[in-house]
Image: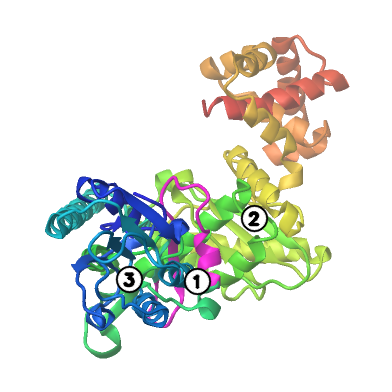
Amino acid sequence: MEPHAPQGTITVARALALPALRKGLPEVLAAGDRLDRPVRWVHAGEAPNIAALLKGGELLLTTGLGLGSRPAEQRAFVRGLAERDIAALVVELGARFTTLPAAVVDTARSCGLPLVQLHREVPFVAVTEEIHTELVNEHYALLRRAEEVHRRCTEVLLGGGGVPEVLRLFAGFAGNPVFLGTPDGRLLYAAGPEGASGGSDPLQVWEGLRSAGMAGAVVTDIPGTGPGPGAVRARLTVLPVDAPLAPVHRIAADRTAGLLAVVLLQARQEEELAARGRGDFLSDLAEERVSAADAPAQARVLGFRPGPGPLLPLVMRPATDLAPADGRAALACAVQEELAGVGVPVLLGVRMPEGRVPLLVGLRDAAERTAVAGRVAAALRAGAERAGFPAPVVVAGAPATWETAGAGLRHAAEAATAAQGLPDRPWHDVRRLDVDVLLWRLRSQGDLAAFVDRVLGPLIAHDAASRPALLPTLAAYLAHAGRKAETARELHLNRQTLYDRLARIGRLLGADLEDPETVLSLSLALRARRHTEWI
């Protein structure tokens, strides 16, 4: 279909290419750059006042008998048609004119009205029938597409998908961004056509709604459960920013709204949906799909308004394998409620398919990073506990700007994955996890497992067959930098027992536990072993 034409229509250019009009040898005399205008209907007539009978969007066929003989009459005739916003004027030469008068051509050009002359006679009824058949076929084809989208949306929901997946499917059908918001105008989720490139960013479009308005939009209420304020649960909005919308899109929107109403009847769906929308934005920021210049405005749309100070990236990684069934909505709601009391601007997202919850926090200055990270981490852990999740891993990144926040989120997310299995802490500083991140990146390579086996193999084999296990003793000894008194206290051993165990470890490994290079290898191997166990 030609650019800018609403789905379910044909354009002037396509109409001229159909056999019935092509036989008339059409020649475009004016507004050749506007042949992508949609044709709503075809009308044939010769009356001087025919403009009064038209509604707009028509392809008008005439022999020119109603054009008048004087230039003033001809100009008025063309201007009247342009004011009615018809699609194009097609004049058949021969009965009235052998060539169109300059007044007609010049007026059409100045009004931007496509003007076509036919050099051969054609039966207007054949043209009308052919174009109307094309219109009906186009509309029927789009109705079938709407039915197919509805079927696919239903399959997505039955297969465990949710509102975001449905909205993305519908956005692809409409070729435009789609929004789900509350009745009072708060954005819950925005989706663009799946796989589209070069289209408008949905969050930027939503930000511009207040100034640009919503002319031509399709807005559909999603019903709630009761009369009065409860009668509308949410609103589905489609904006024609990338392509015009056709009436069939309202039909499809009404059907999609019925599906969404069923999903939203589940408790807390709106908060989970909003959290997933924020998670999409934070993931796009981390993956550099959002520029640093656009990020602040998009964050404001999502309710995040930090001050001029630095940003603090954080990532929470819940233990989703031990989480309650369908606990995502409860987690999003509980964590959001806990964060309300932290006292700093927080943008919380949920990305449960990837097993993480990304956040951006607004700081007044970098000096308060430690204190704020502690408060936010405590709120995250409390929210996870309320939702029935085990204690999560929380990693705080380094203070960032909008230019570096994406990289900070990306690093914190990787560090949160690498920190799984570490001793439980209220929160981890990303700067203390660099070695673990490096080892995590190497986890799938055979060299890392071979290194662990080479350095610790005899000790691992001993612990598999004998008691007491010696690996915990070695780990404690290295953690205390070889200070035997502190190691003994932690392990609740007397010194002689500790000395005996260390001597046995040294013999098994054939290593001197006082040698700095040996200590470095053993420390790395112990940390690497935890990561190889995840393979």
Question: As shown in the figure, which amino acid type bears the numbered disc 1?
Answer: Ser
Q: Residue visible at 57% across and 51% down?
A: 284
**Of tags 3 and 1, which is closer to the observer?**
1
| SS at badge 3 | loop
Q: Are marks 3 and 2 in contact (CB under 8 Å)?
A: no
As for residue 195 lying within the magenta part, the answer is yes
The amino acid pointed to by label 3 is: Ile
Mark 2 or mark 1: which is in front?
A: 1
Front: mark 3 or 2: 3
First in residue order: circle 3 vs circle 2: 3
Instruction: Compare marks 2 and 1 and give the one earlier in the sequence.
Output: 1
* Residues at circles 2 and 1 in contact by the CB criterion of under 8 Å: no
Instruction: Give the CA separation, mark 3 to mark 1.
Output: 15 Å
CA neighbours of label 3 inside 10 A, class few (<14), some (14 to 19), many (20+):
many
Q: In the visual, does 133 lie left or right of 185?
A: left
- Residue 290: within the magenta? no
Where is mark 1, residue-wise? 110
Q: Please, what secondary structure does the residue beneath circle 1 have?
A: helix
Could you say which is closer to the camera, residue 316 or residue 160? 160
Q: Residues within 10 Å of mark 2 (few under 14, many from 20)?
A: many
Please give the range of residues in magenta.
Answer: 181-207
Q: Vertical placement of 517 versus 291: above or below? A: above
User: Disc 2 designates what residue?
Assistant: 314
Q: Earlier in the sequence, mark 3 or mark 1?
A: 3
Mark 1 Cα-neighbour bin, 10 Å: few <14, some 14–19, many ≥20: few
**Quick check: 479 left or right of 251?**
right
| Structural distance between the alpha carbons of marks 3 and 2 | 57 Å
Residue 302 in the image: above or below residue 445: below
Q: Which residue is mark 3?
A: 86
- The percent position of residue 267, horizontal first and vertical second, equals 31, 69
Query: Could you say where residue 442 lies in the image, as x and y percent from the top left?
Result: 64, 24
Q: What secondary structure is marked by label 2?
A: strand
